Amino acid sequence: MSVNKIILLGNVGKDPEVRYFDNGGAVANFTLATTERGYTAANGTQVPDRTEWHNIVLWRGLAEVAEKYVKKGSKLYIEGKIRTRSYDDAGGNKRYITEVWGDAMEMLDRKQEGGANAAPFPQPPVNAQEPPARLQMESSTPNPPLEKEESDDLPF
């Protein structure tokens, strides 16, 4: 089995919920909304915007960064893996949840003077000649596996 990466660009739906474990590890959970823009088809049919909600899980250092800087409405770039798990609800029914376990995160908000959602990183001037460097924050250790993974046999 190979692990596929997913890339999401969207807005945070609620402030992250962060939990700390006895061993000092941390996990953050929040939702991210991505929107596919609507359009008008050649025959004049109006296709509306479509918004999808994703459950994001960040571990260790990324969880701590999310706790400090990510707020409802923040614009984020997330790289990660899709994970599906199941549990039994109070009625004994099996439920499934699909999550994106983030490996990398980039905050895309522009810094605002004194704003509550101001990005914690300095932003380049608007008229900068060179594109801004990518601000990528990666966790110091890989996410714990849910199941045994085999190596990727793709040639690239």
Image: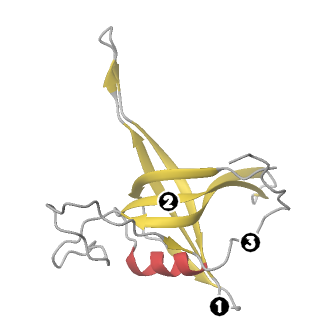
Examine the image and state in which quarter residue 44 appears.
top left
Q: Nearer the viewer, mark 1 or mark 3?
A: 3
Instruction: Tell me the crowding category of disc 2: few under 14, some 14 to 19, or many 20 or more residues within 10 angstroms, Cα based.
Output: many
Crowd class of label 1 (few under 14; some 14 to 19; many from 20; radius 10 Å)? few
Q: Mark 3 sits on what residue?
A: 144
Up the image or down, 53 lies above or below 14; here it is above
Q: Residue at x 28, y 60 (%)?
A: 131
Seen from the viewer's position, the closer of residues 19 and 9 is 9
- Mark-to-mark CA distance, 1 and 3: 15 Å
* Mark 1: secondary structure: loop
Identify the amino acid type marked 2.
Answer: Ile
Of label 2 and label 3, which has the lower sequence position? 2
- Nearer to the camera, 132 or 31: 132
In screen coordinates, is 87 left or right of 56?
A: right
Residue 109 percent across, percent down from the top left:
30, 64
Q: Is tag 1's residue or tag 2's residue first in the polypeptide sequence?
A: 1
* Residue at (82% x, 59% y) in the render: 149
Q: Which residue is mark 1?
A: 24
Q: CA distance from mark 2 to mark 3?
A: 18 Å
Nearer the observer, 118 or 15: 118
Name the amino acid type tagged 1. Gly
Q: Position of residue 71 (x, y in %)?
A: 37, 70
Q: Position of residue 104 (x, y in %)?
A: 53, 66
Give residue 78's mark: 2
